[in-house]
């Protein structure tokens, strides 16, 4: 193999890697947007309703997003996303995970609004 062929091969791989990186960046942006959406919805419902289980929050999210709450597979997927959103919100100190009951997390709004910051 000559040097020009090797150069072309490496250039081709770099181009393919750049395309994969671009796709990964798009995928990450969509996931981040989904987490923000679910986090915002969950925090809002916790502000209104107080303590809720992940299942209760998932049902409220499904109703708000006009999803079929009778679809078990979809509901389980939404519950998983709610758990992820709650963990994200808990790390940012927006909610507090109270306890686990029958395998479900119980969350509540953590913030006491003092100067616009959570404590």
Image (cartoon, grey):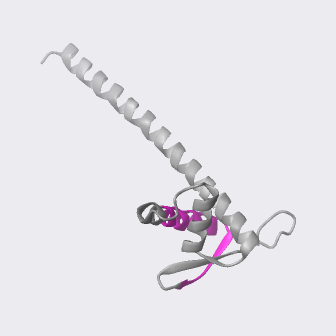
Q: Is residue 80 magenta?
A: yes
**Above or below, 42 relative to 110:** above
In-front residue for pair 66/19: 66
Which residues, given as a range, are shown in magenta? 78-100
**Above or below, 104 relative to 12:** below
Quarter holding the C terminus is: bottom right
Figure quadrant of residue 39 = bottom right
Asked whether, in this view, residue 8 is left or right of residue 56, the answer is left
Q: How many marks?
A: 0
**Where is residue 27 shown, x and y percent of the image?**
47, 43
Residue at image coords 15%, 15%: 2
Quarter holding the N terminus is: top left
Asked whether, in this view, residue 11 is left or right of residue 103, the answer is left
Figure quadrant of residue 42 = bottom right
Q: Which residue of the protein is positioned furthest toward the right in this rendering?
A: 115
In-front residue for pair 10/65: 65
**Where is residue 22 shown, x and y percent of the image?**
45, 33
Residue at image coords 57%, 60%: 62
Q: Is residue 119 magenta?
A: no
Asked whether, in this view, residue 33 is left or right of residue 111, the answer is left
**Where is residue 75 shown, x and y percent of the image?**
48, 64
In-front residue for pair 69/9: 69
Figure quadrant of residue 73 = bottom left
Q: Which residue of the protein is positioned furthest toward the left in this rendering?
A: 1
**Above or below, 1 relative to 116:** above
**Where is residue 32 shown, x and y percent of the image?**
56, 50
Q: Main secondary structure of the magenta part?
A: helix
Residue at image coords 43%, 66%: 72
Asked whether, in this view, residue 1 is left or right of residue 101, the answer is left
**Above or below, 54 relative to 77:** below
């Amino acid at each position: 193999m000559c040097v020009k062929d090797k150069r072309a091969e490496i250039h081709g791989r770099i181009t393919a890697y750049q395309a994969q990186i671009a796709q990964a960046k798009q995928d990450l942006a969509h996931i981040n947007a989904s987490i923000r959406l679910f986090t915002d919805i969950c925090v809002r419902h916790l502000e209104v309703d107080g303590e809720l289980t992940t299942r209760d929050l998932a049902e409220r999210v499904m109703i708000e997003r006009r999803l079929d709450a009778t679809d078990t597979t979809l509901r389980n997927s939404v519950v998983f996303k709610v758990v992820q959103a709650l963990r994200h919100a808990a790390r940012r100190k927006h909610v507090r995970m109270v306890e686990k009951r029958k395998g479900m997390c119980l969350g509540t709004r953590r913030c006491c609004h003092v100067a616009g910051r959570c404590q």
